[in-house]
Amino acid sequence: MSPPPITTWRLENEKRVLARAGTGERPVVVMPGLVYGRSGGLSQMYFVEPGRAAGAVPSIGDGSNHWALVHVDDIAELYVLALNAPTGSVYIGAGGQNLLLADIVQALSQAAGCPGKTEPLTLEEAVRRMGPIAEAFALDQQLSGDRARRELGWAPTHLDALTDIAQGT
């Protein structure tokens, strides 16, 4: 599947960053999953806040797609570890939790104060409400941060995303 238009710039940007290795610099790329935690991030902005206002959290499609999640504290730790990574390394910053959107939306409804209340949207409806980022939210992404674990010793500590999201932590 091709990346949605809102993210197509990333591939060229990452290539340009990695090309800097030829100039003697030490580029490293970290590609984070969907960052959550500390009552912030895109899920807060596009799901919790609208859900709180409307009394139901929006859900895109049938909820069978996966989100590769990473807690903000865990991805921050990966960025620190990446400072000492070999030149030209590329790491996926996903905490190993590739959860179904249907389950995530239930947790988001808890955080929004409307437990169990969701509003199913087609992708077209979601794009009208959220803009082009909705296409990224609709992707099925199952990613692994295993390389970062193996090479950098990265050890995510937030391993229950649904509870963290529901509690807003």
Image (cartoon, rainbow, N blue to C red):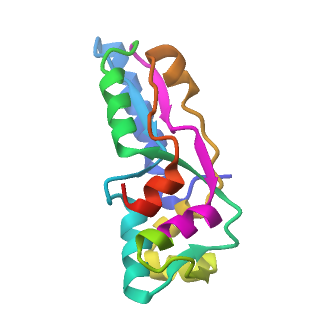
Magenta stretch encompasses residue 113: no
Residue 65 x %, y %:
67, 59
Residue 83 x %, y %:
30, 20
Residue in view at x 54 percent, y 31 percent = 145
Q: Is residue 126 left or right of residue 49?
A: right
Nearest the eye: 118 or 33? 118
Q: Is residue 115 above or below residue 63?
A: below
- Residue 102 lies in what quarter of the image? bottom right
Q: Is residue 168 above or below residue 109?
A: above
Residue in view at x 51 percent, y 77 percent = 115
Question: Which quadrant holds the C terminus?
Answer: bottom left
Magenta stretch encompasses residue 107: yes
Q: Is residue 117 above or below residue 80?
A: below
Q: Is residue 63 left or right of residue 153?
A: right
| Residue sitting at the far bottom | 54
Residue 35 x %, y %:
42, 49
Residue in view at x 58 percent, y 74 percent = 59
Nearest the eye: 93 or 100? 100
> Which range is magenta?
87-108
- Residue 167 lies in what quarter of the image? bottom left
Nearest the eye: 143 or 39? 39
Nearest the eye: 37 or 45? 37
